[in-house]
Amino acid sequence: MPKILIGIQARLGSSRLPRKSALPFFQDKTLIENIYNKWKNYNNQYTVAILAPQGESEDPFWISASQNCKIVYGSDDNLLSRYMTAADHLDADIIIRATGDNPFVHYQLVDKSIKHFLDNQFDYLSSKSDDGCNVPQGLGIEIFTTQALRTVYKTADRIAQEHVSEAFLNNSNIRCGFLLDPFNAKEIDLKITSLTLDYLCQYEMLKGLQ
């Protein structure tokens, strides 16, 4: 059985909604604590960790959060490097990429994604189709092997370092896969539904939901 890491990338330095990870969200817990706990409850055989920037390691919020959450610090602006650090530190074979912007986890979608990934022996899988219409914004995940991560890490340019997906999708050596219609929505454009949290108005609308 491969060792699977659920890596939740998060930071306090968002320009659109500063310190969003620390905002109260549900049942007296912060946004990032809620996200972390949802992933912890998904499968107790998987390792769950928050991947935070090294430059924020002395922030009182992360110090406090580390009492209840596993946190791995890595590069401030190179996300590929941050995932590589976590994979090495936690000895992961496969990584599920999650983010601190997405407070909701659809377990059935994750199940389908993992099964499709393993059954087809992909190097990388996105739960979204090419046009992104098959999954509401904020529910999508990505899965990739640590070996594939090492491959793209060696050649990724600055843009790909910051936008993980592009590093895999633009590398001809990576076998990529997609879920085509996980919700059987057919012609419905699901991406118009947003469950992600980038702005204050979205926070006000989504907080308190579970």
Image (tube, grey):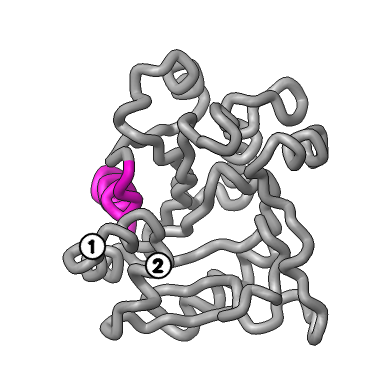
Q: Which image quadrant: the C terminus?
A: top right
Quarter location, residue 94: bottom left
The furthest residue to the front? 15
Per the image, label 1 sits on a secondary structure element best described as helix
Query: How far apart, in angstroms, are the residues tagged by discs 1 and 2?
Result: 12 Å
Residue 40 position in % (x across, y down): 57, 42
Q: Is residue 75 left or right of residue 60?
A: left
**Figure disc tally:** 2
Residue drawn at (22%, 70%) of the image: 151
Please give the name of the residue rendered at 48% of the width and 30% of the height, measured from the top-left corner: 12
Question: Which numbered circle lies on residue 144?
Answer: 2
**Which residue is disc 1 drawn over?**
153
Identify residue type, mark 1: Tyr
- Residue 41 position in % (x across, y down): 63, 44
Q: Is residue 119 above or below residue 136?
A: below
Residue 14 part of the magenta-drawn span:
no
Part of the protein shown in magenta: 77-92
Q: Overall secondary structure of the magenta stretch?
A: helix
Q: Residue at x 40, y 40 (%)?
A: 51
Q: Earlier in the sequence, mark 1 or mark 2?
A: 2
* Residue 206, position as x, y percentages in the image: 79, 40
